[in-house]
Every structure is written in structure tokens, then in C-alpha cells.
Amino acid sequence: MNRTRRGLLDGAARAFASDGLRGTTMQAIAAAAGVSKATLYNHFRTKDEVARELLRGELGRLTELAAALPLDEALAALSDELGAHPVLRRLAEAEPEALTELLAVGPERWTALTARLAGALRLDDDGADLVARWLVGVVLHPGRSSARHRQAARLAAALAVPVGP
């Protein structure tokens, strides 16, 4: 990804964290990125396109983070990232319906997301589904980091126990 596009997405993240998805305009994204609106439109046609690209980038970043760590540490790190993510926190506080729409993916998308998680965490499909559901809970109600870390350790230990046929 080139530097301009990365700067646009960083600006979008700041704008979305400040004003939410609905309250952010293309002008606000351009201003937060320190570019003209024309530059923004050279890369993205709509605010939804910016949001999708930002989400895709965040998923990639989180997948790489998780893949580089042992399971218990990966779960703790993912819970910290999601629990403190500025855009997600803004949506939870000011636009819960937008957050719900973001999290309510169809079966095909859920399968793709959990498959990606399974690969990163080296889990089977059922384990990845369980982790994904826990992480959705973290997004909705992050709680305290220390509690999330204890839960991450318990979840990792439960996933390490072989399941019968």
C-alpha cells in the first residue's frame, strides 16, 4: 500500500473515531488525512468504500498479530486491540446500531472470517468459531483488560484439550 493511501486510511480512522461512521464526511476524512478532497476521491469513491478498506486493513493487521504469537498471547492481544479500538469504542458509545450492522455478517462472510482466524491461530473450525464469538463479545462489552486476559488464558487452555470424536 502506498504512503498516500495509508495516510488516507489513517485519517479516516481518526475521523471515524472522532465523529463516528455516520457523522464523518469525505471532507472530514480528507482534512484528517491532511489532503484535498480531490486526492481522497482519486483513491476512494465513497465513504463506505473508505470504511471497507479500513476494515480490510485492520483485519489483516490483526491476523498478522495473532499469527505471530502463541494462542493465549494471541487471544489476549486480540482482545486488547478490539477492546480499546478507537473506532469500535466510538461506535459502541454513539452508534450502537452501526456497530451491530458491522458485526452482523452473513453465514458466508462469517465462515470466511473464522477460516482466516483458524489459520492465524492454528485452530480447527469449531475452535475458531468459538474464538470469533468471544471476540464479538469483547467488541460489544470490552470490560477490563485483566479480565479479558484471564478469559483468553482459559479459552486457550480449553481449546488445547483434545475433543473426542
Image: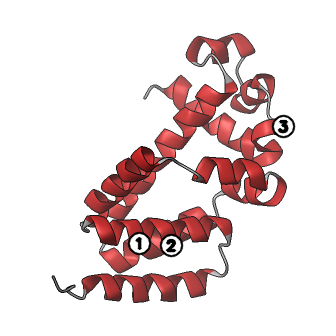
Disc 1 element: helix
Q: Are marks 2 and 3 in contact (CB under 8 Å)?
A: no
- Residue identified by numbered label 2: 134
Disc 2 element: helix
Colour mode of the rendering = secondary structure
Residue 116 seen anywhere in this rendered image of the structure:
yes
Label 2 Cα crowd, 10 Å radius (few <14 / some 14-19 / many 20+): some
Where is 49 relative to 38, above or below?
below
* Label 1, label 2: how far apart the Cα atoms are: 6 Å
Where is 5 relative to 84, above or below?
above
Residue 17 relative to residue 81: left or right? right
Residue at image point 60% right, 19% down: 44
Q: Position of residue 98 (x, y in %)?
A: 73, 47
Q: Are marks 1 and 2 in contact (CB under 8 Å)?
A: yes
* Label 3, label 1: how far apart the Cα atoms are: 33 Å
Disc 3 element: helix
Label 3 Cα crowd, 10 Å radius (few <14 / some 14-19 / many 20+): few
- Residue identified by numbered label 1: 130
Q: Earlier in the sequence, mark 2 or mark 3?
A: 3
- Depth check: 107 or 91 in front? 107
Q: Amino acid at mark 2?
A: Trp
